[in-house]
Amino acid sequence: MADGAGVTTFGVRELLDELRAIIDAAAPTPIWVQGEIRGLTRSRPGHVYFDLVEPGSDARRPEVVLPVALFASDRRQVDKCLADADAGELSEGAHVRIQGKIGLYTARSQVQLVMRSIDPVFTLGQIELARRALLDSLATEGLLTRNSSLEVPTMVRRVALVTSASSAACADALHELESWAIGWDVVLVDTQVQGMGAESMIAAAIARAVSEGVELILLVRGGGSRSDLAPFDSERVARAIALCAVPVWTGIGHEIDRSVADEVAARSHKTPTACAAAVADMVRAQLDLAHDLWSGIERRCTEVVSRGSAALQRCAHRLESSTGHHLRSEQSRLSRIASELPRSASHRVARAEMLHSMLDSRIRGSDPLTLVQKGWSITTLPDGAVLRSVQDAPVGTVLRTRVGDGVVVSTVEEAGT
Amino acid sequence: MTKTDKPPKNYRDAIDELETILEELESDELDIDLLSAKVKRAALLLEHCRTRLDDARVEVERVVAELRDADT
């Protein structure tokens, strides 16, 4: 409507209809646009609303924002498209390429893109690119092998299970751990494992597990789409694992792809059950090893005891033999002494008797009377002394001469030498 | 207690003393006055040694039997 001066004044609806017409004319057909999803919300009727921003924008104050609306009627097609490509679903932070019609949301005078479809290949590619960039960065910092360089105690007694406590993955892992009946202490650390904020929560849960004094952390979740598993490709979780002071084993349920978390973890497994089973296998192997070692020790001890027993038997035999020999030897020695003793004593007496006899003979042989009997005589002076010299018998001396059968008395008439 | 009655310190001493007495008996140096005393001493020593030897035999047989029982 134009006034008298030719100046047009629009009514609100009229102006917005005009703007819409301009926009429609400028972008008459659906266009493709790429960006990062922020502020994703879902309405009760099934509509989805989010902002598309430049990738890497400040999360709280992006410089440029394109509001996007995906109505329920188109959403089913978009969800199917993503599901068929195993690209998950629309999620916060996802880098997407979407197609839609630019229009004007007149209720708010807001330009918005009414989304019709999505390029799932682009989304997957972006995830992969981000994943590779992160892996390169971690490799440069030496973080890919840091956690795997930690020593895993072979006899783990305290294990942390970091996962969503209400998930089937948690139940599976717990069941596997408990089924082995190994007396370990399982610390369940509950965390959200997908969606908004999951990255921070998982990282915090790992730190909490460390503070619980566990020896090993099992980070598990069940299978899901690529976007469901996006937190496990995040830098936040990757660094939390890489810098963790405790070995982290992952059991993230995706049969084909490996997440960044898998790459930085000390060990990765394809399922939560496999992850728990691996711990049990390790401990079981140690128990078997201990059993084998003990069997070896027992066998060796038996051998040593047997050899010792045989040696003792030989010793006992030698003891019996040598002792018997010694006793017999002493017995014969005693017998010899016992038999020699009386003989020696008798001999000693006999020798003494013989000596006595010899002495007696000699004594008797020396008796003057015996000599007189043999023809010798003994002449004595009047005083009884034996005449030994002519000097002792001057003329006139009366001598008494003893002969074998009597005494002859004589007087000295002459003496000379 | 005279030297004749004095018990030997041990088997070895008893045997040595017996051998000495035998040597003395076999030589002419032993005084006849000491002969009977030496023979009595020798008899005591012999009895002592026999007793000790019998005791040792019994003890050895007992120990060896225990060893055999332990092996079986």
Image (cartoon, rainbow, N blue to C red):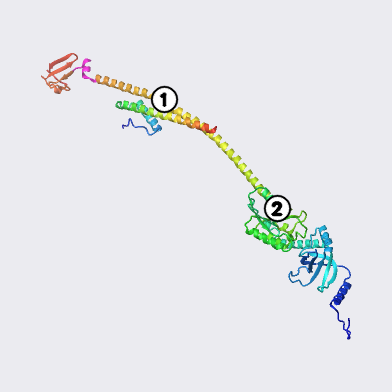
Q: Is residue A372 magenta?
A: yes
**Given the image, on which type of amino acid does mark 1 rest?**
Ser
Give percent across and percent down for residue A4: 89, 86
Q: Is residue A240 magenta?
A: no
Q: In the image, which disc is placed on residue A335?
A: 1
Do discs 1 and 2 belong to a common subunit? yes
- Residue identifier under label 2: A171
Identify the magenta region.
A366-377
Above or below for B32 versus A283:
above
Q: Residue furthest left?
A: A396
Q: Marks 1 and 2: CB-CB under 8 Å?
A: no
Give percent across and percent down for residue A326: 46, 30
Question: For the residue carrying disc 2, how many other residues have a C-alpha within 10 Å: few (<14), some (14-19), or many (20+)?
Answer: some
Q: CA distance from mark 1 to mark 2?
A: 93 Å
Which residue sits at x=54%, y=33%? B71
Give the chain of mark 1.
A
- Residue A249 lies in quadrant: bottom right
The answer, for residue A319, to whether it is visible in the render is: no
Secondary structure category for the residue under label 2: helix
- Residue A8 lies in quadrant: bottom right
Above or below for A289 versus A306:
below
Secondary structure category for the residue under label 1: helix
Give percent across and percent down for residue A129: 78, 62
Q: In the image, which disc is placed on residue B40?
A: none
Give percent across and percent down for residue A7: 87, 83
Q: Earlier in the sequence, mark 1 or mark 2?
A: 2
Q: Quadrant of the N terminus of chain A?
A: bottom right
**Given the image, on which type of amino acid does mark 2 rest?**
Ala
Q: Quadrant of the C terminus of chain A?
A: top left
Question: For the residue carrying disc 1, how many other residues have a C-alpha within 10 Å: few (<14), some (14-19), or many (20+)?
Answer: some
